[in-house]
């Protein structure tokens, strides 16, 4: 039994084919029944004169003859519109109940909570299937590009250590060490820097990042980032690599890049010209046009008035400008020190951010110190990285590119949930499986955890 993809039937006129797919519509014209059949590659009209106990959403097998349609019956809106399948045999693989939500149309008018509750049905709609196909294509292009540039794909742990790097951690209790916890990695940041110490000069991975943050259209508890780190580079080297990769993606998807090379704004220029550090350079909102821009020279530190202390603007491993290291070490003009951070903006959204890293443990300790960390805290949270640097480290830098947000923009979507197969809802629930849920008391007992 050889399955023929629906889109390939146009090459098999006059031949018998075997199709498998889902019934999209059934139109009974009395003597003739038209059944539109869909698989992952497309949709096609099939025809039979025999009554069938068949309904939309049923999964079927069809054996039939590929025939050209009469000229006046050609459907120019379909890739297979010039042909149809004359059914010789139809087998129902699986009967379907009437779905609680329609799977035709774009689905925007359906309550999102209902769509997420029945996501496996929602994903049948062509718009979402196309979005996930585009995501697959972007991933393929990026991976091939980085491979061609000599990068090595390396996985880093998800179960990591809770450290104060910005967002709230998701904590995982340890069964073997009661009372102690892992944290789901907010990013592979420290691991990829230690890979530079290990001598892997070009690293990447499609990394999952977990952050317990409030939900919004462009934020999920877990997201995917194209994570990159490079040794022996300056800021412009990393920016140039990413620019070339995104041009490759744009070209492959037949998108127009508004300005080439990507324009560069300092943080001060961005705030003066646009009053924010993410902005849209397009004069009209054409989804086929990609307006990339870089923002550089961010402040190294941000002052928290309520807490009366400094914190990092990007992450605590971001290097200060070389000319301002002395001020940092003497704790002078801290609010005027700039960093080697760089963010990539696309059509009004931030789609990536990175920096050249600190590799001198003395400078790294000083950054922690001016943020109010005690020596005990520094050793507890970052001692492993500082110790690694004592054994020598190349100068290096990297970037994390948000895959979900990029794919949403490329698909013309407002929300990243439209480019993720099974996103959580706005209230943080994994609607399809009903998580989070109560846990069996026996499991909690094993973990030495009590709930109130």
Image: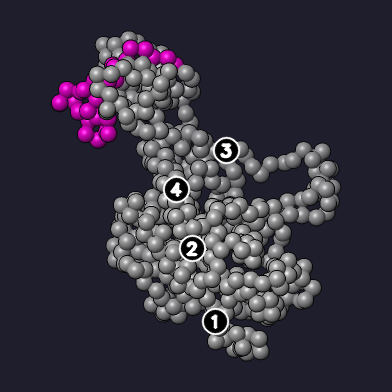
Looking at the rendered structure, the secondary structure element under dot 4 is helix
Image location of residue 202, percent across then percent down: 54, 61
Q: How many marks?
A: 4
Looking at the rendered structure, the secondary structure element under dot 2 is strand
Residue found at x 40% / y 33% = 40
- In the picture of the structure, the residue carrying the numbered disc 2 is 352
- In the picture of the structure, the residue carrying the numbered disc 3 is 432
- In the picture of the structure, the residue carrying the numbered disc 1 is 321
2 or 3: tag closer to the N-terminus? 2
Q: Which label number is shown at residue 140?
A: 4
319 left or right, relative to 380: left
Q: Which label number is shown at residue 194?
A: none
Looking at the image, is 405 positioned above or below residue 345?
A: above
- Pointers 4 and 1 in contact (CB under 8 A)? no
Looking at the image, is 16 positioned above or below residue 40?
A: above
Say if the magenta span includes residue 72. yes
Residue found at x 37% / y 56% = 248
1 or 2: tag closer to the N-terminus? 1
């Amino acid at each position: 039994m050889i399955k023929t993809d629906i889109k390939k039937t146009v090459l098999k006129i006059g031949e018998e084919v075997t199709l498998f797919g889902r019934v999209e519509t059934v139109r009974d014209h009395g003597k003739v029944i038209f059944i539109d059949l869909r698989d992952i590659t497309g949709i096609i009209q099939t025809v039979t004169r025999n009554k069938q106990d068949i309904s939309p959403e049923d999964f079927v097998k069809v054996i039939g003859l590929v025939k050209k349609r009469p000229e006046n019956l050609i459907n120019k809106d379909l890739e297979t519109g010039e042909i149809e399948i004359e059914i010789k045999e139809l087998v129902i693989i699986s009967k379907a109940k009437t779905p609680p939500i329609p799977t035709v149309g774009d689905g925007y008018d359906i309550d999102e909570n209902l769509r997420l509750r029945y996501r496996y049905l929602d994903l049948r709609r062509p718009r979402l299937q196309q979005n996930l196909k585009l995501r697959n294509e972007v991933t393929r292009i990026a991976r091939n590009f980085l491979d061609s540039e000599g990068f090595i794909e390396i996985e880093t742990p998800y179960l990591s250590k809770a450290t104060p790097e910005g967002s709230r951690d998701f904590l995982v209790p340890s069964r073997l060490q009661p009372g102690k916890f892992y944290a789901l990695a907010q990013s592979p940041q420290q691991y990829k820097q230690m890979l530079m110490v290990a001598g892997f000069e070009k690293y990447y991975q499609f990394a999952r990042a977990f952050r317990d943050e409030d939900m919004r259209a462009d934020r999920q508890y877990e997201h995917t980032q194209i994570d990159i780190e490079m040794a022996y580079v300056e800021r412009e080297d990393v920016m140039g690599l990413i620019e070339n990769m995104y041009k490759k993606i744009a070209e492959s998807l037949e998108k127009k890049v508004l300005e080439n090379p990507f324009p560069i704004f300092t943080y001060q220029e961005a705030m003066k010209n646009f009053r924010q550090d993410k902005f849209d350079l397009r004069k009209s909102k054409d989804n086929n046009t990609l307006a990339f821009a870089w923002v550089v020279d961010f402040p190294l530190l941000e002052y928290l008035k309520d807490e009366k202390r400094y914190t990092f603007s990007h992450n605590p491993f971001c290097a200060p400008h070389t000319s301002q290291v002395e001020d940092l070490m003497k704790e002078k003009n801290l609010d005027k020190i700039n960093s080697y951070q760089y963010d990539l903006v696309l059509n009004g959204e931030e789609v990536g951010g990175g920096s050249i890293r600190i590799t001198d443990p003395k400078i790294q300790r000083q950054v922690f110190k001016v943020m109010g960390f005690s020596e005990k805290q520094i050793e507890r949270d970052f001692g492993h990285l500082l110790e690694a640097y004592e054994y020598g480290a190349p100068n290096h830098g990297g970037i994390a590119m948000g895959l979900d947000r990029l794919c949403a923009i490329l698909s013309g979507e407002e929300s990243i949930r439209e480019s993720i197969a099974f996103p959580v809802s706005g209230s943080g629930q994994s609607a399809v499986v009903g998580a989070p849920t109560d846990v069996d008391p026996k499991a909690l007992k094993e973990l030495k955890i009590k709930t109130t």
